[in-house]
């Protein structure tokens, strides 16, 4: 079974803090994604990566950056957290050329005070 | 640009009755269509997908969906609802033409199955 894990289920941070969200997948998938989920807005893509050290902006990259130094790990960074970044963050992965199904992690619920 | 519409924020159905969760899409190329389910405080789980072939797609937990190209719809259905089907359901689409392109998700429909 594919497993996608996220470093924290719940996080509380203060405005202005730098926040790191970590995602690890154990199935050697090339493509990894970060989404945020908000009520009434569904899932919105923040960034994705199709290979190590490669990244592409999604629909809402402002205020976020990402890092992919190893194939299995994709980190989302909030450079200076703001209250409007309070949300559920979901990581996902899929293999290249091996199917279309996205495998999701359990999510990190972030509260920025 | 591609888009997905889930016109109902919530669907209520009695246990044992058939259920339908609606989805319409817009994409310029070949549509790849997906349904995912999310239980409380969990990530999304894949239910089924349409890539090509038969318009009726069968998936996990007894769910199925029908691809209708003329109506640009991909409604999720189940003949007999269970209380355990209560969850948040997301429809998603991506353009299957050319190289990899990102997936666009709908806003989600909350399904409530009433005992």
Image (spheres, rainbow, N blue to C red):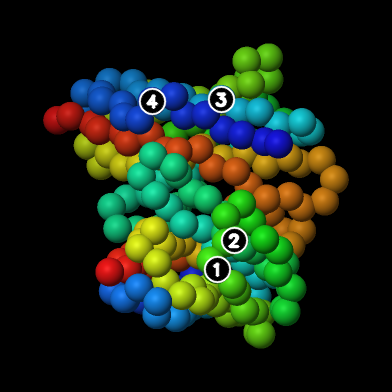
Quarter location, residue A112: bottom left
Q: Residues within 10 Å of mark 3 (few under 14, many from 20)?
A: many
Q: Disc 2 sits on a residue from what chain?
A: A
Q: Which residue is mark 3?
A: B24
Ranked by sequence position, the earlier of labels 4 and 3 is 4
Circles 1 and 2: CB atoms closer than 8 Å: yes
Labels 3 & 2 near each other (Cβ < 8 A): no
Which residue is most to the top?
Answer: B70
State the mark number for residue B8: 4
Q: Are marks 4 and 3 in contact (CB under 8 Å)?
A: no
Q: Is the C terminus of chain A in the top left, top right, bottom left or bottom right quadrant?
A: bottom left
Identify the residue at image location x=31%, y=26%. B11
> Who's the residue at 63% across and 47% down the image?
B103
For label 1, the residue is: A64
C-beta proximity under 8 Å, tags 2 and 4: no
Tag 3 subunit? B
Using the image, name the chain to which the residue with label 4 belongs: B
Indicate whether B72 appears above or below A98. Answer: above
Q: Badge 1, how many Cα within 10 Å: few under 14, some, many 20+?
A: some
* Cα–Cα gap, marks 1 and 4: 31 Å
Residue B25 at x, y percent in the picture: 61, 28
Q: Disc 1 sits on a residue from what chain?
A: A
Q: Secondary structure at mark 4?
A: loop
In the orientation shown, which residue stands out farthest toward the left?
A: B115
Alpha-carbon span between mark 2 and mark 4: 28 Å
In the image, residue A15 sits, relative to residue B113, either above or below, namely below
Give the quadrant of residue A51.
bottom right
- Labels 3, 2: front one: 2
What residue would you read off at disc 2?
Answer: A61
The reply to whether label 1 and label 2 mark residues of one chain is yes
Asked if both marks, 4 and 3, belong to the same chain, the answer given is yes
């Amino acid at each position: 079974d594919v497993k996608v894990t996220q470093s924290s289920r719940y996080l509380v941070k203060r405005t202005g803090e730098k926040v790191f969200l970590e995602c690890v997948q154990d199935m050697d998938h090339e493509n990894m994604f970060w989404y945020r989920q908000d009520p009434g807005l569904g899932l919105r893509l923040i960034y994705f990566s199709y290979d190590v050290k490669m990244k592409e902006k999604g629909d809402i990259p402002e205020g976020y950056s990402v890092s992919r130094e190893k194939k299995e790990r994709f980190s989302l960074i909030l450079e200076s957290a703001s209250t409007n970044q309070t949300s559920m963050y979901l990581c996902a992965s899929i293999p290249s050329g091996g199917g279309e199904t996205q495998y999701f992690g359990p999510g990190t619920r972030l509260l920025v005070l | 640009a591609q888009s997905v519409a889930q016109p109902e924020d919530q669907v209520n159905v009695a246990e044992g009755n058939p259920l339908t969760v609606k989805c319409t899409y817009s994409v310029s190329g070949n549509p790849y269509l997906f349904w995912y389910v999310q239980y409380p405080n969990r990530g999304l789980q894949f239910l089924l997908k349409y890539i090509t072939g038969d318009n009726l797609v069968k998936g996990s937990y007894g769910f199925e969906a029908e691809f209708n190209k003329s109506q640009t719809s991909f409604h999720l259905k189940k003949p007999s609802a269970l209380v355990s089907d209560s969850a948040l359901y997301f429809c998603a689409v991506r353009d299957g033409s050319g190289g990899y392109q990102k997936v666009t998700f709908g806003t989600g429909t909350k399904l409530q199955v009433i005992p």
